[in-house]
Each structure stands twice: as structure tokens, then as C-alpha cells.
Image (tube, rainbow, N blue to C red):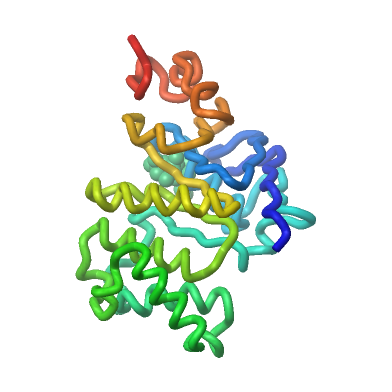
Amino acid sequence: MAPTPCITVDHLTVNYRDVQALRNIRLTVQPGKVVGIFGPNGAGKSTLIKAMLGLMPVVTGRVSYGEGTLARQLDRVAYVPQRSQIDWTFPATVWDVVMMGRVKKTGWFNRFSAVSRRLATEALERVGMLEFRDRPIGALSGGQQQRVFLARALAQQAEIFFFDEPFVGVDQKTEAVLFKIFQELAAAGSIVMVVNHDLGESITHFDQLILLNKELIAAGPRDRVLTRDNMTRAYGGHVGFFGHVA
Ligand SMILES: Nc1ncnc2c1ncn2[C@@H]1O[C@H](COP(=O)(O)OP(=O)(O)OP(=O)(O)O)[C@@H](O)[C@H]1O
Ligand SMILES: [Mg+2]
């Protein structure tokens, strides 16, 4: 298999009616790293992901992946939206949710193939949720739900993974499982982008950071991004973060 190319975001500007959500964002996302997207509430983190995936109109800019635009290659992408955007009353079992990842990959007609069933089983096993396969998705804890959505992303056999705030409402054990799998995906050469807001010790699990507040404040290796100046520009005033000595 050819190595995964980079994603290039070029001069991306996104508005919601009269609100400017993102201004002139330029960045490159490399495979092989766990990349964290940080910034305050309303900074445009979720919007950046949605715009990169072509899920919302952009004013200007282009997001490319290899030879084409990323939005035209969504079969290579697994995206787990922010919890608040998922309808948890939807009557589906854990197994159904993971198999939906296969529909994206193979289309409706092949979704129940032996390969799909095997991949779904392996994915549930990897996140420690196989024994819950017949449970309704709404009858799980927040951490268990996140693991199921991670399993769906794994079953999809994507090469690009986007997770929007996967750690909200999850326990430490689940957080460790999620980080471990993100690191494995990156080590296997995938692109892994994770929106997060916790500036505590967990930030050390990210290889690269993207710091946003409507515009790009900084992007790159953790120690280059986590400077007091950058954090003040992103968050305003004083903000405590791991590794920062006041
Ligand atoms: N559907 C929408 N209609 C109008 N404005 C929106 C919509 N969604 C987001 N916005 C605005 O766009 C800006 C960026 O929102 P976005 O959800 O991308 O931020 P975020 O960084 O993901 O925030 P959070 O940490 O709260 O998830 C905010 O000012 C927000 O109010
Ligand atoms: Mg968000």
C-alpha cells in the first residue's frame, strides 16, 4: 500500500451566516502522528473538521489530500462527531452501530459479508466492547459509547481518523484505551486528528498540536506550540496548562 499523503489546508475561511468561524487557516497534517486540535469553546475546532470533510460550505480555501480534495475521498475517512451531535435515542444495537462503519466502506449490499462481520468483531474486541454487542447504544455509559464509535471507525478501515472531543464524559480507563488505539493508528501510518480541550497532563499524549481561535495561532510539535504567548493569544488572559510554570 502506498504511504498515506498529507492533508493540506490552504487559506480556509468559513462563515455561519454573519459569524466568521474560521479565518484563513493554513496547515499541513502529517500521517504517523497523534494530532490534537485545541482552543477555547467556539474557537472553530468542530467547524474545522466539518469544513475539511466538505460537510459545510466554505467561503474560500481548499483542503487537499494526495492528488484531490479530501471531501471527494470520504471513503478513506472515519469521523466520530462530538457527543452532542449524536442522537443517542436512535434504536440501534452496538453491533448495528459498528456495522454502519462497513456500509460506508462497502455499500449496503455487502455490509453483512463475512469480512465485514469479522472486522466488526475484531474492532469491538480491540476496544473491549464485544460482550456488549447486543445492547442498545443508548443503554451504555458515555465511555462505552465512545468505545463503540471508535470500533465503528476501526471497522471502516479508514486511513484518516477524526475524533471530536472523544474524552468528554469518559472514565480514565476508557481514556487510556482511546489514546492507546490513537497511537497505534498513527504508528501504522494513519492520519489521526483529535479535538480536545483538556490542557492537563493528557496533552502529553499528542505528538503535534493545532491551536486555534478562529485563526490559526500555532501548529507543530507540542513544545513549540505550548508557549505562554500562544496560549494567551488562544485563550486570552492567563491559562494554566501542563508543563507551564507560572
Ligand atoms: N450551526 C451553527 N450556526 C451558527 N453558528 C454556529 C453554528 N455552529 C457553530 N457556530 C459558531 O461558530 C463558531 C465555531 O463553532 P465550533 O462549534 O466550531 O467551535 P468549537 O471550537 O468546536 O467549540 P466547542 O469547544 O464548544 O465544541 C462559534 O462562534 C459558534 O457559535
Ligand atoms: Mg466543538
Along the line of sight, the residue nearer the viewer: 88 or 181: 181
Q: Say whether residue 182 is left or right of residue 188.
A: left
Residue 245 position in % (x across, y down)? 34, 12
Residue beneath the point at 31% across and 47% down: 176
Q: Say whether residue 217 is left or right of residue 231.
A: right
Q: Quadrant of the C terminus?
A: top left
Residue 243 position in % (x across, y down)? 37, 20
Residue 155 position in % (x across, y down)? 47, 70
Above-or-below relation of 57 to 201: below
Residue beneath the point at 40% across and 32% down: 204
Above-or-below relation of 184 to 72: above
Total labels drawn? 0
Above-or-below relation of 63 to 130: above
Residue 230 position in % (x across, y down)? 50, 19
Q: Quadrant of the N terminus?
A: bottom right
Along the line of sight, the residue nearer the viewer: 229 or 18: 229
Residue beneath the point at 41% across and 38% down: 205
Residue beneath the point at 66% across and 39% down: 28
Q: Quadrant of ligand 2?
A: top left
- Residue, far right: 67
Along the line of sight, the residue nearer the viewer: 47 or 188: 188
